[in-house]
Image (spheres, helix red, strand yellow):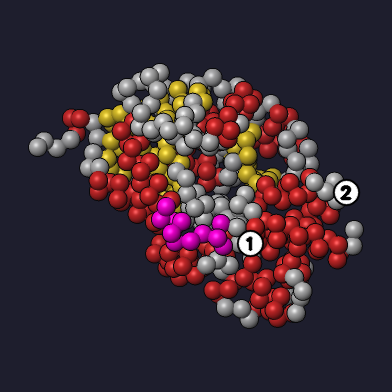
Amino acid sequence: MTEASLLGHAAEAVRIIRKSPQPADLVMSRYLRERKYIGASDRRFISAVVFTCLRKLMTCQAIQEAKGYDDVTSAAHALLEGRADDVVAGLADDVTSNTQAWLIDSTRERWGAAASDVWHALAEPAEVVLRVNERRAPREAILAALRKDGIACREGRWVHSAIVLQERVFLDNRKVMTEGFVEVQDEASQMVSIAAAPRPFDVVLDACAGAGGKALHVADLQRDRGHIIARDVDVKRLRSMLPRVHRAGLHSVIVLPIQHNERYDRLPKAIPREGFDVVLIDAPCTGMGTVRRMPMPKWTLTEDRLQRYVAKQRHLLHTLAANVKEGGVLLYATCSILPQENEHAVADFLAAHPNFALERLPDACAEACDAAGTSLDAGMLQMDPHHHGTDGLFMARMRRAAHSDMPSA
């Protein structure tokens, strides 16, 4: 296929993605599936141009204007090939940060001038990271197996179960995946389960489980000796974890969809009334920490939409707190870097719930805390691609006071 034809396909895909409410990767995958005549190398070319354009839209638009290209995807192609370095060198930081100005302003609350560095990092491609099911095999054995198959990979930096792939490969038909030795899961996401630090026999509620990655990790950390209830309103997504539970050989995970109009704080009778040792709230959020993988939300998010997420997050914290047993742990997480969804949400919750308090994070989080410029004692950790090389992901560990610990009236 000629370069002009490839760029034409890329331009068409970008137009479809920008009009679609679905995630860019799903739209792109469907676009390529429907055009079976496009070969593997051409697919890689088109995908690289499309996602460069979406991640660095403001930069590409500036290149398009400076170079006189007919379409922004031609600018993305020039950027990839290094033919626009002269233009990029003269662009202002608010252009090359490639996000909305109000989002940079929001994140300056945490990082100050370094906020633009974080957004620059969020405009770069994300690596593929695996989580080793360490019940099944040690990480060293999986690293050796992958390398034997000619797959370049390295150890993750922050979590012992993490392996970073140094090239994009199809794993779905390989033994490590089909027999449940690994899962695809970013290292920051793995850190959430580490921060929850479940004990072997704890009863855990993963209240917003999605496709279940964190529930599966918690089960692995518990060596399949605990009890994990995985819940979500998205029944289709939640049930997609069942084959993965089976592949991993887990017996401690129960998938329990949230029924229509069911209240989060009214759990089915099968669940013990005394509450859970650990409640994990991986709250619905803007996804501003995962825009390396799904870039469109950073262009379409509005302040009104952010406030709707904020209201939902506070509602979930308030209602689900009742499911934490006395002396139990509440672990709040989002895949966002916005303080409104993270530190502010925690502060508002604690102000309204004096029976909860932030608790020191586990020692296994120490290096990641150091990289973030915080400490274990803070009880909160924000990971990001600039400081950690991971997705942007926030977590806060809180503990509910035991009755005997509550101050008397």
Dividing the image into 4 quarters, which one contains the N terminus?
Answer: bottom right
Q: For mark 1, does the 10 Å Cα neighbourhood hold few (<14), some (14 to 19), or many (20 or more) residues?
A: many
Give the image quarter of residue 54: bottom right
Residue type at the position of mark 1: Arg
Q: Which residue is mark 1?
A: 55
Rendered position, 245 above or below 111: above
> Residue 17's x, y, as percent?
67, 56
Q: Report which quarter residue 248 is drawn in.
A: top right
Q: Which residue is mark 2?
A: 37
Q: Is residue 361 left or right of residue 39?
A: left
* Residue at figure coordinates x 62%, y 35% from the top left: 183
Residue furthest left as drawn: 409
Q: Quadrant of the C terminus?
A: top left
- What residue appears at the point 60 percent right and 57 percent down from the top-left corner? 295
Instruction: Please state the extent of the stretch shown in magenta in the rendering.
Output: 297-308
Q: Position of residue 89 (x, y in %)?
A: 65, 78
The amino acid marked with disc number 2 is: Tyr
Please name the residue shown 35% across and 54% down the image: 344
Mark 1: secondary structure: helix
Quarter-wise, where is residue 373 in the image? bottom left
